[in-house]
Amino acid sequence: MAKASILTVLMTAASILWLTPGAAAFDKWENLSKEEAKIIVQLLDDVYKFWIVFDTRDHVENMGRIPSATIAKEVFVEMDKKGWHSARLITTSKNFFNPENRPKDDFEMKAVEALNGGSAFYEAVEVVGGKKVFRAATPVPLVMKECKMCHVTAKDDQLLGALVYTLPLSQQ
């Protein structure tokens, strides 16, 4: 049931994106305005966070499965490979388990600072690899008791990490 529900959510999100007026002109996001990129990040954020929470519940009930964060990272790699967007799960704590999850650049370090300070959304338009991109970071708090299976010392609503998104913008 979990896999079918996740697939349904992702297919619904894809349908919403492609049925949005002007979506055909996105050409895999190549001609996005900052406002369009922000809406897409908010949609992706809702889908990914719903999926991670849903999968975490399933993970706890069926111990021995791959952790949801690990699966999410694989989904992010596939989305990037196919040219849709890039996304990364990063830690917002100085104490981290996986060094891969540390903030890697100035944007991510500033995002962690902003999110630790209570911001619900951090964004910037940057030039990366000679192309203009929209970058956004959103908080990932502890939202359910099942999260404590891996995050044993975390408290309810504590910020555990962030999702960082990068979408190409129109180069005009």
Image (cartoon, helix red, strand yellow):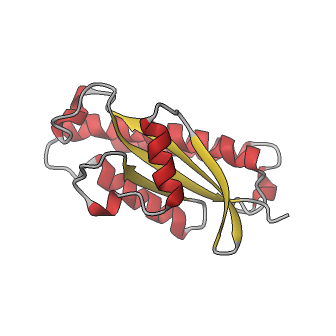
- Whether residue 93 is visible to the viewer of this picture, yes or no, is yes
Tell me where residue 53 appears, x and y as whole percent: 35, 35
Identify the residue at image location x=43%, y=63%. 104
Tell me where residue 172 appears, x and y as whole percent: 85, 63
Above or below, comparing residue 145 to residue 20 in the picture = above
Residue furthest bottom in the image: 129
132 or 76: nearer the viewer: 132
Image quadrant where residue 19 sits: top right
Tell me where residue 18 appears, x and y as whole percent: 71, 48
Above or below, comparing residue 168 to residue 93 in the picture = below
Above or below, comparing residue 53 to residue 113 in the picture = above
Identify the residue at image location x=25%, y=52%. 96
Tell me where residue 155 appears, x and y as whole percent: 24, 27
159 to the left or right of 167: left
Quadrant where the N terminus lies?
Answer: top left
- Whether residue 1 is visible to the viewer of this picture, yes or no, is no
Identify the residue at image location x=55%, y=53%. 165
8 to the left or right of 93: right
133 to the left or right of 152: right
Numbered-mark total: 0
14 or 85: nearer the viewer: 85
Identify the residue at image location x=19%, y=50%. 65
